[in-house]
Amino acid sequence: MSRSRLLGLAAAFFVFLFVEILWIHAFSFGHHQTGDTNVLLAGAQASLDCVHLGIWRFCPNVAPYPLLQYVPASILLRLGGSETAALIFLARISVVAFAGCLGLSWYFFRSRPKIAALAVLSILSSAATYQATSAFGEMLAAFVILAALVSIRTRRPILIFICFALASISKETIPPFIAMLGLIIGWLDAGKRIPPRRIWLPLALGVSLGTLANLLFNQFRFGSFRNLPYLDPGLRTPTWKLKGEYFLAEWFSPVSGLLWFWTIAVLILFAAAFYGLRSFFHDRRSFHLWLPPLLVVGLALAFTFGLANWYSPFGWIAYGHRLAVPLFPALVITALWTIGDQIESALSRLKGKPVLATFFLMTTVFLSLPQITAPWNWLEGWRAVTVSASNQQCNDTVSI
């Protein structure tokens, strides 16, 4: 067995062990009573009551959360589960979804072990680790979105259709983003200007079905195709100046900014911007080299700017930038897919340079450790050995 294969198996074992420790030990310190999830469960019960009474429009007391979050909650309540059991069940789903994201990231790049390791590390060293023990629905959303992108590489139309339909109900604003990311992967995977029909057609149909489900669910709870509570002017960021401040804070705020809570992922996006711009200025005709990475970066900026229009862009009471969790693993995977050759070339230069390789390894460990240990933030005595500034559970409206 080759040395690289042994290292890969050892890394996989330690990642599996980490997930097991999350499941067995860290879970008890997880954020289960989130407030939002309690409201979600009340809305799921109200939905079941409306269906039982034959009310299919203007169902009262159903919160404006994504349809996907209501599915497991409603199933468990329908089976007779209590609210406490439902909260624990949803948090357990987050652990499984987190493990699924790690597995899908490896599977996507399984023929390129260096890129696969970087993809897994970008998620393992992010705020997703903390969300893995939370009852919030962001990790489940991240998993189904990532699964949709992975399905593109299988080129199986039925699987692509199902995955993109599920991903489209994870967040009402997500369909255009996942459609673009899927087309970018399909474009590069096929080596053509336009992805083959067996990719773009089921993708489009899946996104359309998911969007239609979102619209009908809004009719069921609000009597409108729009999500009326989320469109309340009182919940929108009022001025362009404040929107700009929120946007910059989303990326750079030391309390909840992506640079500090998704450090390796953000560095990958920076690399995509760098290589994309370099290719653009070097040879504009070769748009297949510069357009995909710049599109991914543009989608990341557009997504976070969209969140800056919301009065609470980080996700209210949460750890890190909670609302970025659903899309960021997909953004990172797609970014790595567009600049994989350049990343591998850069990593290969570390061979024969032990000092530089050691520095790179130690820097990676330093950047990863705060988020890898985040699930134990509330363990007595643990805060003394972690970065206290980033471990505060706080109202993120003052995170700037």
Image: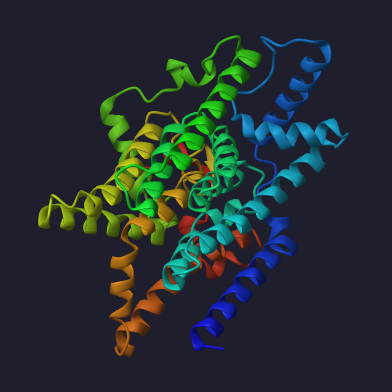
| Residue 230 in sight from this viewpoint | yes
Horizontal side, residue 322 vs residue 181: left or right: right
Residue placed furthest toward the front: 197
Q: Quadrant of residue 169?
A: top right
108 and 26: which is toward the camera: 108
270 up-or-down from 305: above or below:
below
Left/right of residue 134 with respect to residue 254 in the rendered view: right
Image point 31% across, 82% down: which residue?
350
Quadrant housing residue 212: top right
Q: Nearer the viewer, residue 197 or 185?
A: 197
Q: Position of residue 90 (x, y in %)?
A: 71, 44
Q: Position of residue 228 (x, y in %)?
A: 52, 15
Asked which quadrant contains residue 167, the reply is top right
- Above or below, 350 against 310 in this view is below
Q: Quadrant of the C terminus?
A: top left
Q: Is residue 109 above or below residue 393?
A: below
Image quadrant for the N terminus? bottom right
- The structure residue drawn at horizontal position 32% and vertical position 79%, both measured from the top left corner, is 348
Residue 38 can be seen, yes or no: no
Q: Is residue 346 above or below residue 380?
A: below
Percent across and percent down for residue 111 are 47, 69
